[in-house]
Every structure is written in structure tokens, then in C-alpha cells.
Image (cartoon, rainbow, N blue to C red):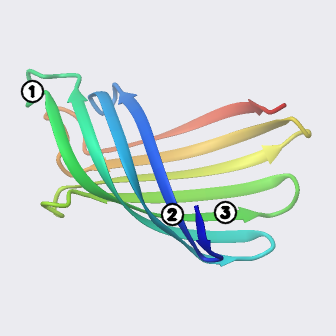
Amino acid sequence: MKITPWLRMEEFTQIQDNKITGIDLRYLLGAGPRFKIFQKEKSAMYFAALPMFEYEEDLYPEKRKVIEKNFRLSTYLSLTWQANAILTLVHTTYYQPLLRNINDFKIFSESKLRLSISKHAAIEIGYRFIYDNDPIPGIPGSIYYLDNSLKFSF
């Protein structure tokens, strides 16, 4: 919901699973303000600070408690740069501390390079970094991966 040219209210919900990080189910629900830092012809930057509820079930319940219910702050900084009609770069980094203990946090960082090959098709190369300073025992705290995809839109 647009409030002013530089302020919007944003709400989100998300369902995740990730065998690599040991998450069987992660459900997120949140809302809050998003600020437009700047917007130019070929670039834009946004910042948001959104309180959220997090429900998480581990894949490996024998290693620690099975279910977590937390309130976190989901802050993010997002930058988009469109070099030309063919090439676009989008980067977003999320920092999600627990509200009751800011020393327990997660970081998600994603960069995508999009190369349009036609009006309806594009190639995307993505890099993702995940950090959890309190991971499930036996799961690394830092995980990163590269993915490639072919996108079609109609």
C-alpha cells in the first residue's frame, strides 16, 4: 500500500523447506514499512524493517527441539540496476534477528543477473548466501550456492 512517494506498507507470507539447512518447514508472516532510498532511470534502492512471525520445524528432531515459534525483525536492503534493455542485476540482503535476543540472527543474501534473450525468455544466474548463527547441530552455519535458470513469461 503506497502511503507517500517514498513510503509503502508491505506484507508478506512465505513457506519454505530446505534439506541443506535442515528445515522441514519454515512459515513466515510479517508486515511493516518499506522505504524508497532512491530511484533513478536505471536503478533503485529500498530498505524495509518488517516484524515477522516465524514457525520452523527441523528435519532432524533428534538433534534439537522440533518446533520453534519466534518473532524476528526482517530487515532488508534491495538494489536493482538495469544496465540496458537486456541486462539487469538485482541484489537483496536480509538480516533477521530474534526480537527477544538480537544475538540470534539469520542472514540471507541473493544476487541475480538477468539476461533477456527475447521478449518472453531470459537466462538468470543467481548466487545465494545463507548464514544462521545458531544452526541445527551438524548443519553448517554458512551455506552458499549458485543456480542457473531459464525463465519464460507470457
- For marks 1 and 3, the one nearer the N-term is 1
Identified by mark 2, the residue type is Met
Mark 1 neighbour density, 10 Å: few (under 14) some (14–19) many (20 or more): few
Which badge, 2 or 3, comes first in the chain's sequence? 2
The quarter of the displayed image where residue 54 is located:
top left
Residue beneath the point at 26% across and 55% down: 72
For disc 1, the marked residue is: 63
Q: Which residue is mark 2?
A: 9
The kind of residue tagged 1 is Lys
**Callout 1–callout 3 Cβ contact below 8 Å:** no
Residue at (50% x, 58% y) in the render = 10
* Comparing labels 1 and 3, the label whose residue is closer to the camera: 3
Marker disc for residue 80: 3
Judge by depth and name the residue closer to the eye, 54 or 135. 54
Q: Answer with left or right where residue 82 lies relative to residue 80.
A: right
Where is residue 11? Give x, y as percent: 47, 52
Residue 148, percent from left and from top: 64, 34
SS class, disc 1: loop
Query: Is the residue under label 3 in contact with that under label 2 (CB below 8 Å)?
Result: no
Tag 2, which secondary structure?
strand
In this view, the mark in front (2 or 3): 2
Q: Is residue 17 left or right of residue 64?
A: right
The quarter in which the C terminus is drawn is: top right
Residue 58 location, quadrant:
top left
Give 100 or 58, whichever is nearer the viewer.
100
Furthest residue in direction right, as rendered = 118
